[in-house]
Image (cartoon, grey):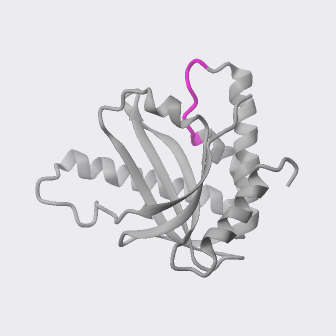
Amino acid sequence: MRLLAVALSLGFVLADSASAAPAETSNSEAEARSQLIARAASIATRLQSGSLESVADEFHYPSSYTEQQRVDDRKIIRRQLAVLTQQFGELETFTLTPTAQPFYRIAVGSVSNAYWDNLPNEGISAGVSFNTTNKKISRAVLAFTFYFTNQRFELRSIEFGLGADQPNAQERMAAIGIMLDTPGK
């Protein structure tokens, strides 16, 4: 069994490009962006309701995987999502991020970065980010990364994070990350 993608890093939440689409953006690009935002919101709503199995089903799993590999990966993803939702507390609200902001994040995904690096994606990767309020952490970030492959956008990762301007954000996220690597937590 391989380790699923779990990373702690400083990243940037990107502004919603759909609400301020440049003039050269085509209608089909704006429509695709709108669909990704709706898909990310749907996944966030399922996280909010605690439907972790449904969320785990959203991730991309390679066609070369056996059914047992898919079952095993979904189980690990559900556990990681459960740890993150327990540490952040119940997701109370989420709003589309209006501006770019740096944040410390933990990313949960189904396959390694090397796998994604070897896929042809026609140069398209997209992210959708939300500012959130949670039961335990009043100001957080929930971000989704999608990757274009197989003629559609596939969910690559879900990132939970804290703004870089928050006190002890890096240390708090590192402590949560340790819990993801500790079975049974």
Relative placement, left or right, of 148 versus 67 is left
The foreground one among 112 and 36 is 112
Image quarter hosting the N terminus? top right
Which residue is drawn at the image coordinates 57% and 39% (left, top)? 59
Number of residue marks:
0
Q: Residue 50, located in which quarter of the rendered image?
A: bottom right
Could you tell me residue 174's position as x and y percent? 68, 63
Chief SS of the magenta region: loop
Q: Residue furthest right?
A: 184
Q: Is residue 60 a member of the stretch shown in magenta?
A: yes
Q: Is residue 95 above or below residue 8?
A: below
Relative placement, left or right, of 116 versus 92 is left
Tell me if I can see residue 90 in this picture.
Answer: no
Q: Which residues make up the magenta segment? A: 58-64
Could you tell me residue 72's position as x and y percent? 75, 31
Tell me if I can see residue 151 in this picture.
Answer: yes
The foreground one among 172 and 16 is 172
Q: Is residue 89 above or below residue 9?
A: below
